[in-house]
Amino acid sequence: MERGGFLQGIKEFLYGFLLHGMVLGVYGQKAQLEDIFILFVLGETIGVPVFPGFYSMRLIPYYTARFSHWKKKTVKPKDLLDYLHD
């Protein structure tokens, strides 16, 4: 067995044991904040007038690629099993 392989295994174990939960939490919080920001920028397309048109028009080119995924995720109806997962 290689020494580099053993050290890499220890490194991956410690990452999973100590940091993986925190990293997942940070990614989840980032996704929630991004959803809120997209709501402010593109909310008028689903009927939520929250941001002045001038600013949203300047930011639209940066978020149009993510809009279809965000709209499906936001407008998707949820059932009981979706709430049990959280």
Image (cartoon, rainbow, N blue to C red):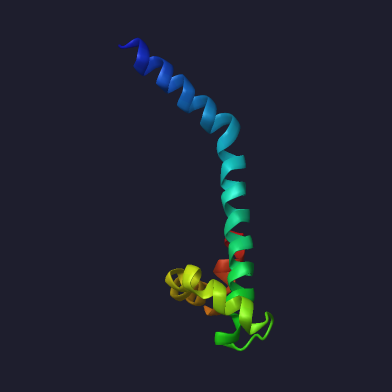
Quarter in which the N terminus is drawn = top left
- Answer left or right for 25 relative to 76: right
At horizontal 58% and vertical 34% (from top left) the residue drawn is 19
Q: Which of the 4 image quadrants contains residue 80?
A: bottom right
Number of marks in picture: 0
The foreground one among 72 and 78 is: 72
At horizontal 44% and vertical 75% (from top left) the residue drawn is 68
Quarter in which the C terminus is drawn = bottom right
At horizontal 53% and vertical 25% (from top left) the residue drawn is 14
Res 74 seen here: no
The foreground one among 16 and 66 is: 66
Res 76 seen here: yes
Q: Position of residue 25 (x, y in %)?
A: 61, 48
Q: Which of the 4 image quadrants contains residue 9?
A: top left
Q: Position of residue 62 (x, y in %)?
A: 49, 68
At horizontal 48% and vertical 23% (from top left) the residue drawn is 11
- Answer left or right for 27 relative to 2: right
| Position of 46 relative to 3 (above/below) | below
Q: Position of residue 30 (x, y in %)?
A: 60, 55
Residue occupying the far bottom of the picture:
47
| Position of 23 relative to 46 (above/below) | above
Residue occupying the far left of the picture:
1
The foreground one among 44 and 23 is: 44
Q: Which of the 4 image quadrants contains residue 33?
A: bottom right
| Position of 11 relative to 20 (above/below) | above
